[in-house]
């Protein structure tokens, strides 16, 4: 099973029924698996804070949500995380493409990579970094933890991970 | 009529409906005039009422009304293509368009100048868009709810505010009683 298919299977097994996304090329395979799944409703968003609103609505409606996005999006979602997801105590796993790490061809991506973990730490968001393919074994536990704690969590997936997980 | 008078006129139509209400004065006015467990008040996060409403409408069957403002829709203009392309016939987006950022002191918005949110919504692909005057607000909302079709209402009204207290309810209280109202609405 490909790394992408396993991650999406883990989402389904965790009861996630609603996914919103803003794409990243590292997450192309995940998004294709989500679109192929009849267990997950996929609503692409135009911006990640909009996506967090969609996820909040899905949660209020009784469906477990997940957002898929690039780490650059942390620059536009701080307010939505603090005043919506965290303030109302909502669970939200964020499956994040960690651009700007080793293997990155686009120099500008590094500019947000250097802030990524600092922003997440400032927001007190528990953060998990998938660097090797086997790190994805933690994903089911992270999802259970997210919904148990009713908080956002960040799962950072870097270029080395995706290089191994194909 | 200003926004508070529009919201007052909507109260009979909103009774027992699932309502997601925009940040600031709209939520404070709705809370003061017509609080009910099926109201979700946004205490922060400008612009996301329509997104929360759509997400809620897509995952369950009860009707959802999002009360938004022209300024907030302009803040999150990307919401309109998402709404248009993910049709939820149990969803009504009611935009109170007073042409101003009411909660921050009635600074003018572009919706009060050259920009027509109704035409923007249509251009985004929203199929049922209704523009109405403040005096027709309740009737337009009632029609939308009875149509069983996703509807965007742009209700033109005057700027201006009334004194209202802030909402002191805890966000988790608002969340929990709203979730229970959603469950009741779905039987």
Image (spheres, coloured by chain):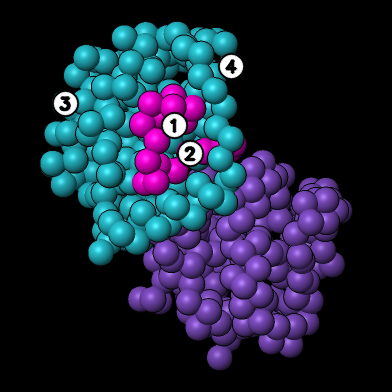
Chain colours: A purple, B cyan
Cα–Cα span, label 1 and label 2: 8 Å
Cα–Cα span, label 2 and label 4: 18 Å
Looking at the rendered structure, the secondary structure element under dot 4 is helix
* Quadrant occupied by the C terminus of chain B: bottom left
Q: Which mark is residue B139?
A: 3
Q: Position of residue B134 (x, y in %)?
A: 26, 15
* Pointer 4 or 1: first along the chain: 1
Q: Which residue is mark 1?
A: B31
A155 left or right, relative to B122: right
Q: Which residue is drawn at the image coordinates 31% and 9% (left, top)?
A: B1
Q: Nearer the viewer, mark 2 or mark 3?
A: 2
* Pointer 2 or 3: first along the chain: 2
Q: Which residues are magenta?
A: B26-45
Q: Which mark is residue B104?
A: 4
Cα–Cα span, label 4 and label 3: 29 Å
Q: Are marks 2 and 4 in contact (CB under 8 Å)?
A: no
Cα–Cα span, label 3 and label 1: 22 Å
Kindly identify which chain the residue marked by label 3 belongs to: B
Q: Is residue B35 magenta?
A: yes
Q: Nearer the viewer, mark 1 or mark 2?
A: 1
Q: Which residue is mark 2?
A: B41
Establish if B182 lies above or below A50: below
Q: Position of residue B157 (x, y in %)?
A: 33, 13
Q: Position of residue A95 (x, y in %)?
A: 63, 66
Q: Position of residue A135 (x, y in %)?
A: 75, 83
């Amino acid at each position: 099973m490909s790394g992408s298919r396993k991650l999406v299977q883990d989402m389904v097994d965790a009861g996630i029924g609603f996914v919103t996304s803003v794409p990243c090329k590292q997450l192309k395979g995940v998004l294709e698996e989500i679109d192929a799944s009849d267990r997950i409703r996929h609503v692409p968003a135009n911006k990640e804070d909009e996506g967090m609103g969609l996820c909040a609505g899905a949660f209020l409606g009784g469906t477990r949500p997940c957002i898929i996005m690039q780490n650059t999006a942390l620059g536009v979602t701080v307010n939505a995380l603090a005043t919506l997801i965290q303030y109302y105590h909502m669970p939200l796993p964020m499956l994040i493409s960690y651009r700007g790490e080793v293997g990155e061809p686009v120099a500008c991506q590094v500019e947000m990579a250097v802030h990524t973990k600092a922003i997440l730490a400032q927001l007190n968001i528990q953060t998990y970094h998938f660097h090797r393919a086997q790190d994805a074994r933690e994903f089911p536990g992270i999802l259970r933890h997210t919904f148990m704690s009713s908080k956002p969590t960040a799962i950072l997936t870097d270029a080395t991970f995706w290089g191994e997980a194909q | 009529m200003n926004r508070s008078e529009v919201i007052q006129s909507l109260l009979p139509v909103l009774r027992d409906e699932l309502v997601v209400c925009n940040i600031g004065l709209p939520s404070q006015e709705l809370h003061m005039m017509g609080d009910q467990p099926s109201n979700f008040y946004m205490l922060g996060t400008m612009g996301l009422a329509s997104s929360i409403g759509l997400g809620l409408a897509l995952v369950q069957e009860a009707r959802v009304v999002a009360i938004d403002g022209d300024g907030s829709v302009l803040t999150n203009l990307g919401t309109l293509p998402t709404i248009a392309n993910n049709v939820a016939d149990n969803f009504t987006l009611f935009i109170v368009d007073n042409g101003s950022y009411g909660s921050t002191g009635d600074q003018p918005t572009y919706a009060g100048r050259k920009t027509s949110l109704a035409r923007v919504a249509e251009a985004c692909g929203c199929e049922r868009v209704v523009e109405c005057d403040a005096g027709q607000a309740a009737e337009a909302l009632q029609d939308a709810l009875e149509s069983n079709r996703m509807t965007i209402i742009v209700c033109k009204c005057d700027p201006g505010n009334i004194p209202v207290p802030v909402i002191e309810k805890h966000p988790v209280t608002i969340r929990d009683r709203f979730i229970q109202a959603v469950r009741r609405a779905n039987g």
